[in-house]
Image (spheres, helix red, strand yellow):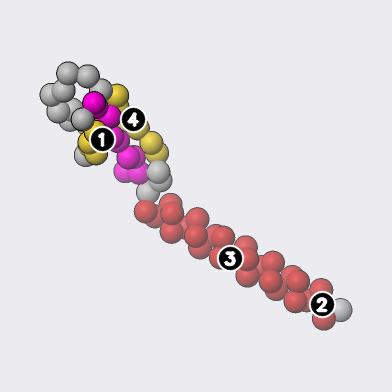
Amino acid sequence: MGYDVTLKTKSGKIKLETFETENGFIGIKLPVVEEGKVEVKYTGTGLMNVTNFISVIGVCILIGIILKRKSQL
């Protein structure tokens, strides 16, 4: 889903599992703790990270081709 959810308590950090609810929202199950903070970060899906990497490689290749053509003129 692309979300990283952690629960920060006095005793440390607990990574929480996420799931998609019936309405399409992100859901978590909280353990029983007296006090803590839930931190949610969107890290992107694996597919998004791969496509971003491919895009950067493509731009680098394009810049290399343009620079090579300019140096031949």
**Residue drawn at (40%, 45%) of the image:** 44
Q: Which residue is mark 1?
A: 13
Quarter of the figure that contains the N terminus: top left
**Mark before the other along the chain sequence, 4 or 3:** 4
- Tag 3 or tag 2, which sits nearer the N-term? 3
Distance from disc 1 to disc 3, alpha carbons, whole Å, reads 39 Å
Q: Quadrant of residue 37?
A: top left
Residue 61 location (% of width, % of height):
63, 70
Q: Is residue 48 left or right of residue 65?
A: left
Q: Which of disc 3 and disc 1 is earlier in sequence? A: 1
Point out the stretch of residues depicted in magenta.
Answer: 1-10
Residue pictured at 13% horizontal, 24% vertical? 32
Query: Which label is found at residue 58?
Result: 3
Q: Is residue 54 above or below residue 23?
A: below
Q: Are marks 2 and 4 in contact (CB under 8 Å)?
A: no
* Membership of 28 in magenta stretch: no
Task: Find residue 39 and name its label.
Answer: 4
Closer to the chain start, of discs 1 and 4, is 1
Query: Does the segment drawn in magenta span residue 7?
Result: yes
Q: In this rendering, does residue 3 appear at all?
A: yes
The image shows residue 51 at horizontal and vertical percentages of 47, 58
